[in-house]
Image (cartoon, rainbow, N blue to C red):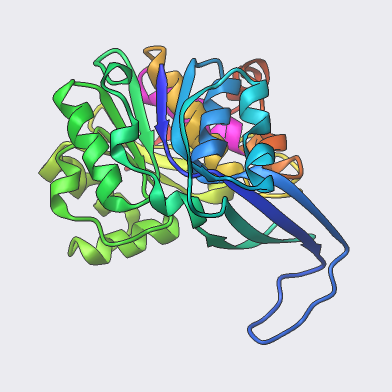
Amino acid sequence: MVVVFGSLNLDLVARVPRLPAPGETCTGTAFFTAPGGKGANQALAARNAGAEVALFGAVGADAFAAQALSNLRAAGINLDGVATVAAPTGVALINVADDGENSIVVVPGANALARATQVYDHALGETGTLLAQLEIPLAEVAGVFRRAQACRMRCVLNAAPMTALPPSLFEFLDVLVVNEHEAKALAATVDCPGPPERLIRELHAHFGVLTVVTLGARGALTLADGRLQQAEPPPVEVRDATGAGDAFVGAMCAAFDRGEKITRALAEGVAAGALACAEFGAQAALPDAARIRAATENVELRYLP
């Protein structure tokens, strides 16, 4: 099972011809609301990719909560660990440009009250995968990883949005996922300047953490069998990149959870991320297992010097 400890939001999405510059007002072409939040998105991505999934997090006692949970409930995700708290359901304010680029502002709301104690002990075990992100309090994320590591559970952190990570946290992780911007910020905090390749090698050497850096249209990069490996996605027409990172992480964790090695998990993640870019929305764009596996055949894997 993939156990996800993370955020649940309602996305408020505006379509715009281009992203506005600071201080600029742009006229949008469309508006809609949709369930979101990195925790919810990645839980649904893993479920669509074929994994059994349980989600732990928090929503408010408001009208947004039911919509935030609707797709997860319909997909059969275990929501027993989602608490209703005395704060509004989190929201994300998203601008999506015609070229597929986006800008996002997240207001945590109830997510700030998610607690590690919500994750019950019998959800943690060495046969499962624990996945978390950083749209909920870092101290709570660390608390869950500490317990899961003691159970020898596979621990995966998508360090987004990036914040300073205490070195002790790396001791609990098996896999760390960041994008290029997050990798650069992380490299500065751990005194490892330079390209993402150096960060990948250094974190593995010092902490034994397998670091995956997503590269947008260029796929993703990691260490496989002691060598740097890049997975390049199949070509797609990019319509909306909003949920691509979450599709990648969820599909990769689903592959890990059924016993796949890093090369296959990386390829399936890249395939899922590419497919998500070809559709509008975040959760609505998440591909199913059949489409992911078909697209994985067109992912190019190569070792770097």
Q: Along the horizontal axis of the image, is 150 left or right of 26?
A: left
- Asked where in the image residue 48 lies, by quadrant, the reply is top right
- Can the viewer see residue 232 in this picture? no
Vertical comparison of 212 with 96: above or below: above
Which stretch appears magenta? 261-273
Q: Residue at x 32, y 43 (%)?
A: 305
Instruction: Indicate the quadrant containing the N terminus: top left, top right, bottom left or bottom right.
Output: top left
- Can the viewer see residue 107 in this picture? yes
Q: Compare residues 206 and 305 and report the one nearer the observer.
A: 206
Q: Residue at x 13, y 48 (%)?
A: 168
Q: In the image, is residue 99 part of the stretch drawn in magenta?
A: no
Q: In the image, is residue 271 part of the stretch drawn in magenta?
A: yes
Q: Along the horizontal axis of the image, is 65 left or right of 245?
A: right
Q: Residue at x 49, y 49 (%)?
A: 215
Q: Along the horizontal axis of the image, is 56 left or right of 11?
A: left
Estimate the x, y position of residue 291 in percent, counting from the top left: 68, 21
